[in-house]
Amino acid sequence: MGRARCMCSSIALLAALVGCGDAGAGEADDEGSSTTGSSIQDITDAQFSDRTPGCDAYVGDYTAVAKDLSTGTSFAAQVRIELGGEAAGDTCTLSSNGIPNHDFGDLGPFVTPVGQVQESFTLAAKPSLNDASAPLSLMLDDGVLRNGVKIDLLAAACYGVGPDPLGQEKIGCFQDGTPWRYDPISPSTAFGEDSHHAHTQPDGAYHYHGDPNAMYDPSGAAPSGLIGWAADGVPIYGPYFDDGGIVRKAVSGYSLRQGARVSQPGEAAFPGGDYDGTFIDDYEFTGAGDLDACNGMSVAGVYGYYVTEGYPYVIGCFRGTPDASFAKGMPPPPTSR
């Protein structure tokens, strides 16, 4: 299913939502509501706790109010989840205007101001896992969260590729598999994210590059709830899970490589130096944690991806087949230096 994009007026949308009415601020009813009824659930600042994996459990209309703290501008978020598919309940369609359910921009203004970008994604209600995993791709958004904001983990920036000075690249690396792709979450890179590890795309779409920390209870008092779905329909959970009666954070199976970087075939330029997490190539999967190479595991018979403090933060690869609705238009790859 293709995606329609449009820029909307936040003032007009706020007025429309007020006309429809909403639920109490900050509360989220994880059981969902009918899209044909008059109830619109307010998920402003909601921390999701329900662990039911299927998108069909969350059918309903949702709204929230969020503020760009760098400008003081207020926005209305709008999310709808409805059933679809050839057989009733095979799939869900999640449509949103891309505005989060929490305030954003707390660390300063983004290069491109946040805008309302209408998008729709198709999710498998009961996703199947493949024998072999599929890599993340610049051609796909990686997932969408329950607040309607997408996950786009890979930076379109690699060392020696694009129009920026060497070592300061921020855009231009659109070819999958290019060596020395920057990790936008690394402290040694400056991609202008806020404290939610998110910023904007050139069209103003707010998106997460890492841990979407406003979506779950950070206390660890209980296992984290479902916060969204990957492009393959697999559920995404916050970091906490029940490990034999003990609630703790899931640990990534990736480790930082040790020693000096080694030149790679196909690189546009070699950054040199030691492995320090500046690039995603600085990590390797060692199986040292709880999760597989895709950042997933099965808990109580349900396979899901888990948010982690370390790389790859949310998803490392796809265990299922990504839906075509997550495809994004990309410019042709630039000429390397």
Image (spheres, rainbow, N blue to C red):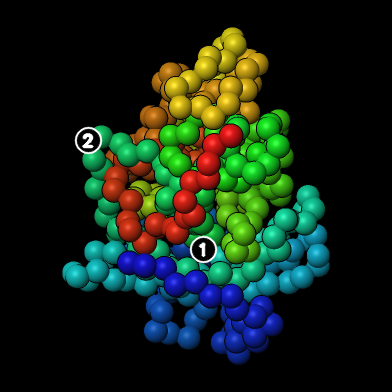
Left or right: 197 as drawn, with respect to 134: right
Name which residue lies at 68% across and 32% down: 166
Q: Position of residue 233 (x, y in %)?
A: 34, 53
233 in relation to 297, above or below: below
Q: Position of residue 321 (x, y in %)?
A: 29, 48
- In the image shown, does 18 or 51 lie closer to the viewer? 18
Residue that protrudes farthest toward the left in the picture? 87
For label 2, the residue is 131
Three-letter code for the amino acid on which mark 2 is drawn = Asp
Name which residue lies at 51% across and 51% down: 151
Residue that protrudes farthest toward the top in the picture? 259
Which label was assigned to residue 148? Answer: 1
Q: Quadrant of the N terminus?
A: bottom left
Three-letter code for the amino acid on which mark 1 is drawn = Gly
Which mark sits nearer the N-terminus, 2 or 1?
A: 2
Name which residue lies at 53% across and 75% down: 6
Location of residue 113 by image quarter: bottom right
* Residue 50 visible at all: no
Q: Position of residue 317 (x, y in %)?
A: 39, 38
Q: Quadrant of the C terminus?
A: top right
Name which residue lies at 51% across and 27% down: 267
Query: Dot 1: what SS?
Result: loop
Q: Position of residue 2 (x, y in %)?
A: 36, 67
122 in relation to 272, above or below: below
- In the image shown, does 175 or 121 lie closer to the viewer? 175
Q: CA distance from mark 2 to mark 1?
A: 29 Å
Left or right: 235 as drawn, with respect to 282: left
